[in-house]
Image (cartoon, rainbow, N blue to C red):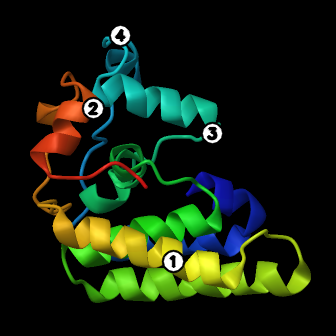
Amino acid sequence: MAAINNQFPHVEQFLQSLDRLTEVLGLNVPPILEIQKLRSLPVGTLGRTLVEFLDTHQLVPLTTGPRRKQLHDSVHVLTGYGTDPLGEAEVQAFLLGAKFRLVHILLGLGLLRIICKQMVTGVGSYPPDRTWERLWRAYQRGYNSQFDVNAWQPELQWQLPLIQVQAQFHISRNL
C-alpha cells in the first residue's frame, strides 16, 4: 500500500482516518510484526519472505490500526500480487473471492478508479482486457482457496515455509 501512498497522498489520509475510526470502535491492536525477529528466520519462511518483500518494495510495515490493516502486506506475500494499483486491486479481488465483504468491493472500486485514471493519462500500462482478466483470475484464486483473512494468525506461521502456508489455504500459484 505504501507504493500507492507515495503516488496518491489521499490514500495515507484514508489509512489515518481508518486508524481513528477503528480506535473509536476498539478494533486497533498492538503491532503484529516484529521485523527483527522475522529478519532472523530462514530464507523461504513466511516471515522472512515478508521482510524481503517490504525491503524490495521499500515499504514501511503497517503497524498501527486493526489487525486486517497490519496483515495487508502479508496477503501480498501469500498471493504474490504486486504493489502497483493493479496488484492492490488483485489483492482485493482475491479477498473478495475468498470471503465476500463489502469493504473489498469498495476498496477495489477505488483502485479501479486509480487504474482507469492512469489508463487515460497514459501513466499506467494496463490494457483493459488484460486488467479484467487478471482481476477475474485473482477472484477465482480467492474463491478456490480456503483463506479467511479475519481468522488468519500468521504469528503462528512466520517460521513455516511460505509454500506450506499457501498449500494449507489452498492458494494456488499466481498464474
Q: Which residue is mark 2?
A: 162
Disc on res. 106:
none
Which amino acid lies under the numbered mark 1 shown in the image of this protein? Glu
- Marks 4 and 1, how far apart at CA: 38 Å
Q: Are marks 1 and 3 in contact (CB under 8 Å)?
A: no
Q: To which quarter of the image does residue 117 belong?
A: bottom right
Label 3, on which residue? 57
Locate residue 21, reporting x and y percent: 36, 77
SS category of the residue bearing label 4 = loop
Residue 40 image label: 4
Residue plotted at (46% across, 80% down) = 107
User: Residue at horizontal 32%, vertical 11%?
Assistant: 42
* Residue 123: percent from left, percent from top: 86, 71
Mark in the foreground, 3 or 2? 2
Type of amino acid at the residue the image marks with label 4: Ser
Q: Tell me the residue at 43%/88% (across/down).
A: 106
Q: CA distance from mark 3 to mark 2?
A: 18 Å
Q: Quadrant of the N terminus?
A: bottom right
Name the residue located 22 percent from the left edge and 43 percent from the top edge: 166
For label 1, the residue is 133
Determine which quarter of the picture holds residue 129.
Answer: bottom right
Q: How dense is the environment of label 4, judged by Cα within 10 Å: few (below 14), some, or many (20 and up)? A: few
As drawn, is 40 to the left or to the right of 127? Answer: left
Residue type (three-letter) at the residue carrying disc 2: Leu
Point out the tag, 1 or 3, that comes first from the N-terminus.
3
Q: State the image coordinates of residue 115 (x, y, percent, origin top left).
A: 68, 79
